Image: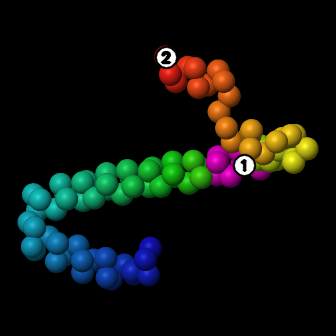
Amino acid sequence: MFGIGMTELMVIFVIGLLVLGPKRLPELARSLGRTLAEFRRASTDLRQDFLDVRDQAHRDPPPEPPSPSDVDDPAQADAPSKSQTKASDG
């Protein structure tokens, strides 16, 4: 666990007990445990979201761009159609 042995954990516990006192140390430990559990849960959710997006990308490849033969006149492809201009005028 983070390269900390049993002796180091005992020293940290004793220092915490002396600094915080016997009443606050269990509260702090509980709060730290809850925070670590929430962090672990959030990181697991985030990792799962990334894996889902990656799997989705592998299943559904991006669509291919239209070939030049699909568009007759490139100038007309960029210009709005008559129905689009009438809708925006009204």
In the rendered image, residue 86, in percent from the top left (x then y), is placed at: 58, 20
Q: Is residue 55 magenta?
A: yes
Residue type indicated by callout 2: Gly
- Is residue 32 visible to the viewer in this orientation of the structure? yes
Dot 1 falls on a residue whose secondary structure is: helix
Can residue 60 be found in the magenta stretch? no
Task: Give the mark, 1 or 2, whose residue is nearer the N terminus.
Answer: 1
In x, y percent, where is residue 36? 36, 57
10 Å neighbourhood of mark 1: few (<14), some, or many (≥20)? Answer: few
Q: Is residue 73 left or right of residue 32?
A: right
Work out whether residue 79 or residue 11 is closer to the camera in this orientation and state it: 79
Per the rendered image, the range of residues in magenta is: 51-59
Nearer the observer, 65 or 68:
68
Q: Which of these two is toward me, 48 or 31?
A: 48
Q: Position of residue 72 (x, y in %)?
A: 86, 40
Residue under label 1 = 57
Identify the residue at horizontal 16%, vertical 77% (top origin). Answer: 15
Tell me the CA gap for discs 1 and 2: 41 Å
Question: In screen coordinates, is 5 left or right of 27?
Answer: right
Q: Is residue 50 above or below residue 11?
A: above
Residue drawn at x 64%, y 48% is 53
Q: Image height check: is 7 above or below 42? A: below
Q: Position of residue 50 (x, y in %)?
A: 59, 52
Q: Which residue is mark 2?
A: 90
Instruction: Specify the principal SS of the magenta part.
Output: helix
Q: Name the kind of residue labelled 1 in the image.
A: Ala
